[in-house]
Image (tube, rainbow, N blue to C red):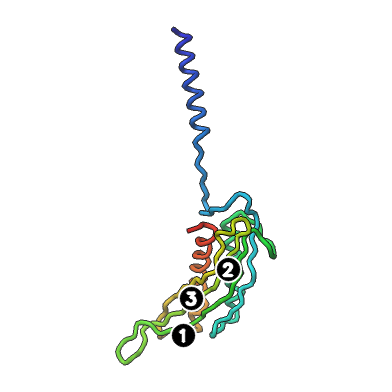
Amino acid sequence: MGKVRLLVLGVCWVAIFFMVNSCRINYSFTGTNLAADVKTFSVQYFPNRARLVNPNLSQKFTEDLRDKLLRQTSLQEVDEGGDLEFSGYIDRYEIRPMAIQKDDIAAQNRLTIAINVKYVNNREHEVDFERSFSGFEDYDSQASFDAVEEELIESIIEKLTEDIFNATIANW
């Protein structure tokens, strides 16, 4: 009777061992959803083709996109020909009045930035795309645009890089 109990207990432990080892869940704390063979990325300079040009916007956006990819993935950056390739241009940089009050005076203005992005996944070409991403921030029309421009750009670029990251790396 003792040997049967020992045998049943041994079989149970073996069964538990195989069940635990066969049930694996992969977690990604960065939210990435990349194939195992994707190792590199390249980000080309995003020139400013908007009618209104901020001289620092192209460099700022390009660097912030690179930084986001380096911080939130384990991918290595290469100058060109990465497994994932990002290119495009700044399509729009504009200020428009918002929240018109009496006497046709705007209470707020809106800065909008639109980026045209071409994404090429050299490991899975069926997910390649070219599309526009846009973001905006409103600010008080009484404030000087020069005084708030840098802060607005920082906020908009943060949103844009997050949207691009989610559309490409995270596949959202």
Structural distance between the alpha carbons of marks 2 and 1:
34 Å
Most extreme residue toward the left, as rendered? Answer: 102
Most extreme residue toward the bottom, as rendered? Answer: 103
Q: Which mark is residue 118?
A: 2
Structural distance between the alpha carbons of marks 3 and 2:
24 Å
Which type of secondary structure does the marked residue at label 1 adopt? Answer: loop
**How many C-alpha atoms fall within 10 Å of the one at disc 3: few (<14), some, or many (≥20)?**
some
Residue closest to the eye, 97 or 154: 97
The residue at 35%/89% (across/down) is 105
**How many C-alpha atoms fall within 10 Å of the one at disc 1: few (<14), some, or many (≥20)?**
few
Structural distance between the alpha carbons of marks 1 and 3:
12 Å
Residue closest to the eye, 139 or 41: 41
Quadrant (top left/top right/bottom left/bottom right) for the N terminus: top left
Q: Amino acid at mark 2?
A: Lys
Which type of secondary structure does the marked residue at label 3 adopt? Answer: helix
- What residue sits right under mark 3 in the picture? 152
Q: Are marks 3 and 2 in contact (CB under 8 Å)?
A: no
**How many C-alpha atoms fall within 10 Å of the one at disc 2: few (<14), some, or many (≥20)?**
some
Compared to residue 144, the image places residue 135 above or below, namely above
The residue at 49%/25% (across/down) is 15
Q: Amino acid at mark 1?
A: Ser
Residue 125 locus on image (x, y percent): 59, 59
- What residue sits right under mark 1 in the picture? 144
